[in-house]
């Protein structure tokens, strides 16, 4: 078990770690349900969030962000080279752990005001608000919508640096979409960026060097280098 390379290229090799990550991400739902009866605080800044307009068309980048959250781990499993995939998976596990911990330690929720706007995008957004009423409006700070998309964006940029400008623009639009759809407050968004930066730093400065030293010790790193 210790000498198996869980990050070696090929879906068969990577499937167990992908399954672990996807299963771990589902912890979001029991935490949200658990916190529904625990109260918490509303992390709004009245001067900013109280004047934040509802712009229904921003549900479009919001939905694209959701699709990216669901698709990117699978895409990365097929496409990212071994070391970059390893860094992505470790960073993803770290940022999720930070998010889950903060939700439990500092429960926060979002108050969803009725949507009075009409039209296709408003109706689409109303569906998201209604869904949140069922599954729970906690897990607010940090915004998982922000940190999932941002961590994926960072590693996509490393894979294709020439796409840095459009990817960064999308990451910003994704963050704005959470506020202009009234799904999150500005503190939720800033916390989402903050835990992403922290998780990315911890992964690359401490965890990856440690993991790769262990890989060398168990012969995995040597085998990988020989294959290259």
Image: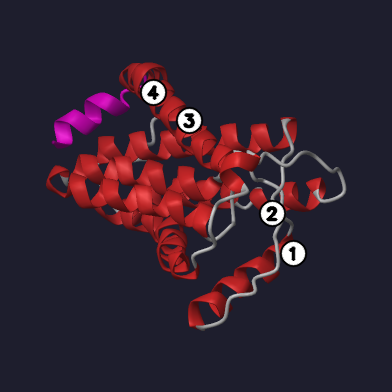
Q: Would you say residue 91 sits in the magenta stretch?
A: no
How far apart, in angstroms, are the residues tagged by discs 2 and 1? Answer: 13 Å
Tell me the quadrant of the picture where the C terminus can be found. top left
Left or right of 222 on screen, residue 32: right
Q: Secondary structure at mark 2?
A: helix
State how many labels appear.
Answer: 4
Instruction: Locate residue 3: give its quadrant.
Output: top left
Residue interval drawn in magenta? 218-228
Residue under the image location 48 percent in, 30 percent down: 194
Q: Position of residue 183 (x, y in %)?
A: 59, 56
| Residue underneath mark 1 | 133
How far across and how far down the image is residue 71, in percent? 40, 61
The earlier-in-sequence mark between 3 and 2 is 2
Relative to 69, residue 127 above or below: below
Q: Which mark is residue 201?
A: 4
The image's mark for residue 194 is 3
């Amino acid at each position: 078990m210790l000498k198996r390379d869980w990050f070696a290229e090929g879906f068969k090799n990577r499937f167990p770690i992908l399954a672990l990550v996807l299963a771990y991400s589902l912890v979001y739902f029991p935490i949200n349900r658990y916190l529904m009866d625990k109260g918490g605080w509303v992390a709004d800044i009245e001067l900013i969030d109280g004047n934040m307009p509802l712009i229904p068309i921003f549900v479009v980048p919001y939905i694209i962000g959701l699709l990216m959250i669901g698709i990117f781990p699978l895409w990365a499993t097929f496409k990212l080279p071994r070391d970059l995939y390893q860094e992505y998976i470790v960073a993803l596990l770290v940022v999720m752990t930070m998010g889950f911990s903060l939700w439990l330690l500092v429960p926060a929720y979002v108050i969803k005001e009725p949507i009075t706007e009409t039209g296709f995008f408003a109706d689409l957004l109303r569906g998201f608000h209604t869904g949140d009423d069922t599954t729970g409006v906690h897990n607010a700070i940090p915004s998982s919508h922000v940190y999932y998309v941002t961590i994926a964006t960072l590693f996509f940029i490393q894979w294709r640096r020439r796409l840095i400008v459009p990817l960064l623009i999308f990451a910003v639009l994704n963050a704005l979409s959470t506020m202009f759809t009234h799904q999150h407050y500005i503190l939720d968004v800033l916390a989402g960026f903050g835990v992403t930066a922290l998780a990315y730093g911890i992964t690359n400065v401490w965890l990856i060097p440690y993991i790769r030293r262990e890989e060398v010790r168990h012969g995995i790193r040597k085998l990988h280098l020989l294959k290259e």
